[in-house]
Amino acid sequence: MLTSNYKAVEKKILILLVILVFSTNIEAQLRLKSAETYYQNLSYQDAIDSYSKQVKKERTNGEALFNLANAYRLNGRMTEAEIWFEQAVIYNPSPLCKLYYAQTLLSNSKYLKAKTWFLKFADQAPSANDANLARDMAVFCQGLEDNGMPGYTYIINEARFNSDLHDYGPFFYKDSAVVFVSNRGVKTDRNKKDKWTGENYMKLFITYVNHNTNDFTVPEKFLKNYSTRFHEGSLCFTSDYTKVYFTQNHVKNNRPIVDDNMNTLLAIYSADMIDGEYANFAKLPFNNEKYSVCHPTLSDANDYMIFASNMPGGLGGMDLYVVKREESGQWGVPENMGSKINTFGNEVFPFLDREDNLYYSSNMMVGFGGLDVYVATKSGKSWEKPINIGVPINGSKDDFGIVFGKDNSLGYFSSNRKGKDDIYRFIGGFEITNKKKDIDSTIVNEWRPSVCGTVINAKYKNLLKDAKVDVVSKCSGDETEIITLNDGAFDFPIQENCDYRISVSKKNFRDTIINFTTYSLSDKECVRITIPLTFIDNDKLISSNIIVYEGQVLELYNIYYDFDKFNIRTDASNDLDILYELLIKYPSMRGELSSHTDCRGTHAYNEKLATNRANSAVKYLIGKGIDAKRITAKGYGETKLKNECADGVDCTEIQHQRNRRTEFKVTYLNETIQSKEIETWLK
């Protein structure tokens, strides 16, 4: 979906944590100080720390907001990415900002919002191809909202050899073991950690399986005769296991090879089996010191290899290439697999099964969010159009690195669906019954349920933003964390015939836990759940860390009014007390306290009602000792609605409640502001 205007950016960021494109560990990076330099050099955790401080002082800095959001996205922290992209699109006009926001919303299962932002990107896309693919994604998002996720006959479980750290990139070894990538047990100090993630470097491990008991041995280092202080990555073997090909950071004279942005490149290495151990480690001839080559897979006859690379001349970030083994036994010249397989995004982690069907992951084909796994069937000397293999393999997070056993009925894949990279075992199969079938027809023909939830104040029914929703599937153990935005809504896909547990928490409200089941569901667009939280009256917020500035509008989210009334409700005084503390803290501050109604009633009546409400809030503050000259009351009635609920529009009580609110605009401030952080409600 990215045109040539975006290629430089996409090649620089490559493809999240799981692609193994890691920043280098050279000493010069340790001296970097600016957020932009951290960001340009892929030190995303350092960039997050630095940009977080910067946006506290410059909350309208579009570039800083975008880079902060994107750093979260590239570290796989999609909840935080969504929060900051929501701010970035206000102040950053870049089409790329809209695109990444849409992708993040899709990854977080916010399908209708994702659709909206894909269409906004399409309106500004710099090429017809970009615009068309964005519109296809918008149609796909609507399909997910209407029909839920499609699925196939897989049963999945988390692999027993996962650790508390990152584990991914599994591959079968002689049908009795699994080799995989992990950063467990790697002893490193701060100066030797990966600057992208701030975590340990990745190494290859092996675990042996007892097929009768399905138990695994304690994983141990795989390449015992080989040592590097950088990353090792995904691998493959020849069919007789006499040779291994694996990804590693590209090094020369034991030093990393970096590109112009000081990013360590990747290369494919090989080793031969000698006396029961792999030795004779060597680089493949098509590696290059100008770009990365990674993620090898071999045909069943070992006569060609497919790998991922960002070499010049490709269609986007990472493309898949095929290289044939010549009669001399040497490798030939790699060829790009073309637009049927590759996109303007990233295609990574290829795997060829015993029939040479090609499985791989992409983040730019029509899919469920993040990286999805696709399969392209072999037809003669080429491959057909890829098919999304559906859920439960794919979901809203990154799913990649799939491998199959001998009969394609058992295998492993990698996913960060629980917030970190883990390996999952699956039983079942994806039936390729129609080589020309694509994911769009699957979505239309097969209904899958989903939840559309809303978090509200139990007493006053107003929508609650920034509530944390934790969802646990009692079938698969999958955990999903969602943060509600301004509309108080959350949504996520669910399985049929399964039990779920939802835990909801928010500051100043009591935690709430509910259980629900998807047994005996009727066909409906969405399972709708409303979760009320009880407000804790005596747990007052404090304003000591809130930044204010002249011209700022503070929306006091907890100040709401009952229909046709203007008295101060119990939950309203909490935010009024915050405003009182700010007025005491900044004695020069003056402002307008405005009140707003919903659309019901006449304009004249609503304006009068809003004025009474504003006066009621001002009187509350004056009663606490604030000089009346510092606050002006203003009633706007229904003239500044926060949603589409105008006259003639059918809306729920909760939607109307969103418009019954109070705001405070700082009209004058002559203070030196010092603050450590911004409270969430000021975002």
Image: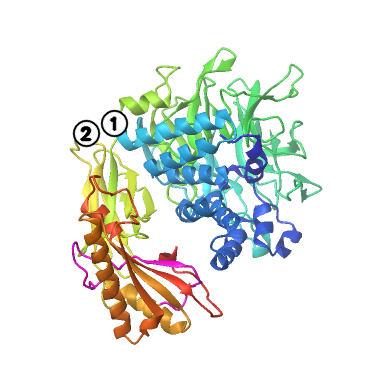
Image disc number at residue 264: none
- 126 inside magenta stretch: no
Residue 523 image label:
2
Q: Is residue 455 above or below residue 377?
A: below
Residue appearing at x 64%, y 45% in the figure: 21
Q: What is the x, y in percent for residue 301?
A: 61, 20
Q: Amino acid at mark 2?
A: Asp
Q: Residues within 10 Å of mark 2 (few under 14, many from 20)?
A: few
176 horizontally vs 330: left or right: left
Q: Position of residue 622 (x, y in %)?
A: 32, 83
Residue at the limit of the structure toward the right, as seen here: 253
- Contact check, label 2 and label 1, Cβ < 8 Å: yes
Residue carrying label 1: 447
Asked whether the viewer can see residue 521, the reply is yes
In the shown orientation, is residue 509 left or right of residue 289? left
Q: Amino acid at mark 1?
A: Trp
Magenta span: 543-571
Q: Quadrant of residue 211?
A: top left
Q: Position of residue 577 (x, y in %)?
A: 34, 78
Q: Nearer the viewer, residue 603 or 216?
A: 603
**Residue 179 x %, y %:** 55, 41
Q: Which one is nearer the viewer's eye here, 683 or 251?
A: 683
Rendered position, 381 above or below 20: above
Residue 549 part of the magenta segment: yes
